[in-house]
Amino acid sequence: MTIISSNPFAFSELMARVNALGRRPPVQEQRTVLKVADLELDLIRREARRAGQVIELQPREFTLLEVLMRGEGRVITKTMLLERVWDFHFDPKTSVVETHISRLRAKVDKPFQVQLLHTVRNTGYSLHAPR
């Protein structure tokens, strides 16, 4: 005959686990709207706005802008963009990144006074508000 304990675990183990959970950093809420200066990207609606005006983006342009906005203020290299936007894990030696950046710049920056999308020579691109 086996005896089944009414407690399937030791109380000290339960307390240790509760204490460990209490030491963890709080779970950060996933943002659904990214914002840089007056540029907003709504990830749920798949909509971009700048100064309240809707910006029509192709799906690849939207993804490119999302990657740049998530890396706000940091330089994102061409290789990083190829991996994150096109899922290329090699450099195809094409100007696909430059072409899409140019199209994105025409939609996001050209109609407005302040530039947010910056080229970092021989390195990559950065999206940030002017300092």
Image (tube, rainbow, N blue to C red):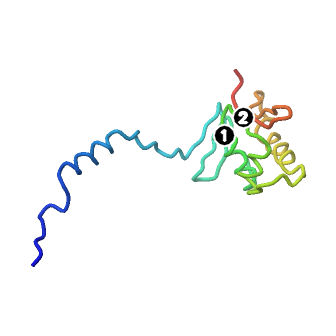
- Quadrant housing the C terminus: top right
Q: Secondary structure at mark 1?
A: helix
- Quadrant housing the N terminus: bottom left
Neighbours of disc 1 within 10 Å: few (<14), some (14-19), many (20+) = many
How many callouts does the rendering have?
2
Front residue of this view, candidates 3 and 74? 3
28 vs 67, left or right, is left
Q: Secondary structure at mark 2?
A: strand
Res. 40 image quadrant:
top right
**Which mark is drawn over residue 69?**
1
42 vs 104, left or right, is left
Res. 98 image quadrant:
top right
| Residue at 10%, 71% in the rendered image | 3
CB of mark 1 within 8 Å of CB of mark 2?
yes
In percent of width and height, residue 17 lies at: 28, 48
**Which mark is drawn over residue 127?**
2
Residue type pointed to by label 2: Leu
| Residue at 84%, 52% in the rendered image | 91
Res. 34 image quadrant:
top right
Q: CA distance from mark 1 to mark 2?
A: 6 Å
Front residue of this view, candidates 97 and 103? 97
In percent of width and height, residue 38 lies at: 65, 33
Residue type pointed to by label 1: Met
**Residue lying farthest to the front in this orientation:** 1
**Residue lying farthest to the bottom in this orientation:** 1
Q: Is residue 38 above or below residue 34?
A: above
